[in-house]
Image (spheres, coloured by chain):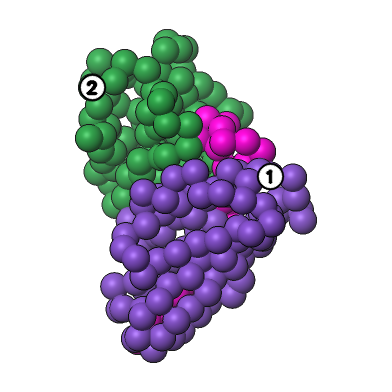
Amino acid sequence: GAGVSQTPSNKVTEKGKYVELRCDPISGHTALYWYRQSLGQGPEFLIYFQGTGAADDSGLPNDRFFAVRPEGSVSTLKIQRTERGDSAVYLCASSTTGQGGTYGYTFGSGTRLTVV
Amino acid sequence: AQTVTQSQPEMSVQEAETVTLSCTYDTSESNYYLFWYKQPPSRQMILVIRQEAYKQQNATENRFSVNFQKAAKSFSLKISDSQLGDTAMYFCAFRRMDSNYQLIWGAGTKLIIKP
């Protein structure tokens, strides 16, 4: 597509529920990144995919968080047993190679997750 | 560990004025990258400008320029002839040379351009 698409734009869920957040990167971008942005803060790195594999998942806060990218394009961030502290904007970005940190990523508009 | 500090939570200026946003960082590395990103209400992060630490010349992109003071670990963003569309959150970010994707971000400055 023309840009990075994230769905849903907003998600409200109850504490303890499971949620999936979807990211559709720019066509041909092999690298995909997930960030979490809490209110009043800058983004916090979660995970980086190169193709289908997670090249670095060191930012995932705990084992309730998991992400997949089975065909090397669309990625899904999965959060189990959601907690109120998971409320944040989840940003996805993509780049042509793993050089997003040099030449800049293309970001989506994020999913605002609210856990009530 | 590296840290990035933006000491101005919010700033506002009149349209057409010049505004400078501050950023300081802490690192023991000699080579790295610095960035300014803009986040409008649409939430999409947009790269404004980047600077390589080994380049002494300050980066410029049209109305946007930086004042990079390596010894002082300061990286301020100057916006000239500000426009209403410049209203947004602005984030300063740092990247180590040996990690080509992980950015360390400041907390942001909310910039309001008044008509």
- Figure quadrant of residue A95: top right
What's the mark number on residue B32? none
Name which residue type carries label 2. Answer: Ser
Find disc 1 in the rendering and name its residue.
Answer: A29
Marks 1 and 2 belong to one chain = no
Question: Which chain letter matches label 1?
Answer: A
Q: Is residue A100 magenta?
A: yes
- Figure quadrant of residue A17: bottom left
Q: Is residue A40 magenta?
A: no
Give the residue displayed 22% in from the left and 35% down from the top. Answer: B1
B52 vs A50, left or right, is left
- Figure quadrant of residue B53: top left
Give the residue displayed 51% in from the left and 49% down from the top. Answer: A54
- The one of A55 and A59 positioned closer to us in this rendering: A55
Q: What letter labels the chain drawn in purple?
A: A
In the displayed structure, would residue A10 be above or below residue B18? below
Question: Which chain letter matches label 2?
Answer: B
**Colour representing chain B:** green
The residue range painted magenta reads A93-116
Find disc 2 in the rendering and name its residue.
Answer: B28
